[in-house]
Amino acid sequence: MPHARDWDENEIFPQDVLREAAALGFGGIYVNDDVGGSALSRLDATIIFEELAQGCTSTAAYISIHNMAAWMIDAYGNGEQRRRFLPKLCTMEHFASYCLTEPGAGSDAASLATRARREGDHYVLDGSKAFISGGGRSDVYVCMVRTGEAGPKGISCIVVENGTPGLSFGAQEKKLGWKSQPTAMVMFENCRVPAANLIGAEGQGFKIAMAGLDGGRLNIAACSIGGAQFCLDRTLDYVRERKQFGSRLSDFQALRFRIADYATELEAARLMVRRAAHAVSEREPGATRLAAMAKRFATDVGFEAVNGCLQLHGGYGYLRDHPIERVLRDVRVHQILEGTNEVMRLIVSRDLLGN
């Protein structure tokens, strides 16, 4: 929290602070402990991310992405891969990125075009990934690539290590928010990756990607709740002190009711996220639907609450001297990434009604 404004203003990726977080166990929250993880539950993770997001929503969100990538290696990698990659990811000596989205494949992730063709003991990758958190800075890129037929069954998961010949990065994106984490295109041109870096079997990549996103959606939802709670707590203090028309803002019933609604909706979102987290941990039927419901609801409610808190601060809320505008910029993207909220509705409706 003390550094969040500086990280945002100066677009600082706080590597040393991230490694301090990893020393507390936040580099591999639900990675197994035999490779240095904390072996906690998805429910534990949502509580952690809600609290971290009160300090800096952008940095908490990067930790979420790093954890998602590490978990995919832990859950689907073989013993050698887990021992090779995960100890350094859990300490954040190495940082990880998740590479699914492409310039031509956003919500329609199954149409991704990055190709990996097998040549002996290597896969040769050609293509590009877009909007990659950690792009250009991460050491490990967990990539979804096409090894076979069109559609989801032709997608595989492979780890590309920084420094691999043929791997390059675009310029750092200039973003509305999330400024404490780098974001760039990740590009492959005749990029030769050892076949030993294939995670799971060929054709299993889309399943791995979607399983990772169930947890990622819960974490990003928790980050929205944390950011919104941070703003609401400060708004409570502000309306008790600010006077207009001879009365404190907190004495106006219309404003009291708005605050009551924000608090109620955040509590409902928190319960939805924690219920879905339990379902994902226990592999309950319908867990993906519950995660999508929670992500859609919590990120929408979180943004609306932050936006409302900014309104209640009036002109002061619009100034960079106050933290609410920063949180507003950070939580806005939560309605887009880890699957847009429109795609969340698609997942829910398909689960209820079928394709």
Image (cartoon, rainbow, N blue to C red):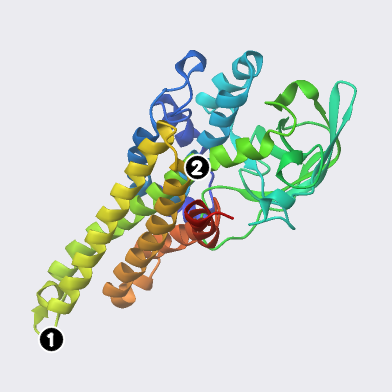
* Residue 346 visible somewhere in the drawing: yes
| Callout 2 amino acid | Asp
96 left or right of 323? right
Q: Which residue does the numbered mark 2 point to in the structure image? A: 214
- Specify the label residue 50 is tagged with: none
The image quadrant that residue 206 belongs to is top right
The secondary structure type at the circle numbered 2 is: helix
Gap between marks 2 and 1 measured at Cα = 49 Å
**For the C terminus, which image quadrant?**
bottom right
Q: Is residue 38 above or below residue 237?
A: above
Circle 1 Cα neighbour tier, 10 Å, few/some/many (<14 / 14–19 / ≥20): few
Q: Position of residue 304 (x, y in %)?
A: 36, 67
Q: Are marks 2 and 1 in contact (CB under 8 Å)?
A: no
Q: Which residue does the numbered mark 1 point to in the structure image? A: 245
The secondary structure type at the circle numbered 1 is: loop
Q: Is residue 40 above or below residue 232?
A: above
| Callout 1 amino acid | Phe
Circle 2 Cα neighbour tier, 10 Å, few/some/many (<14 / 14–19 / ≥20): many
Q: Is residue 21 above or below residue 5?
A: above
Q: Position of residue 188 (x, y in %)?
A: 81, 42
Q: Residue visible at 29% across and 48% down? A: 271
- Given residues 202 and 31, the one toward you in this image is 202
Q: Residue visible at 41% across and 47% down? A: 290
Q: Position of residue 78 (x, y in %)?
A: 64, 17
Q: Residue furthest bottom?
A: 245
Q: Position of residue 92 (x, y in %)?
A: 53, 28
The image quadrant that residue 43 belongs to is top left
184 left or right of 212? right
- Given residues 154 and 230, the one toward you in this image is 154
257 left or right of 285? left
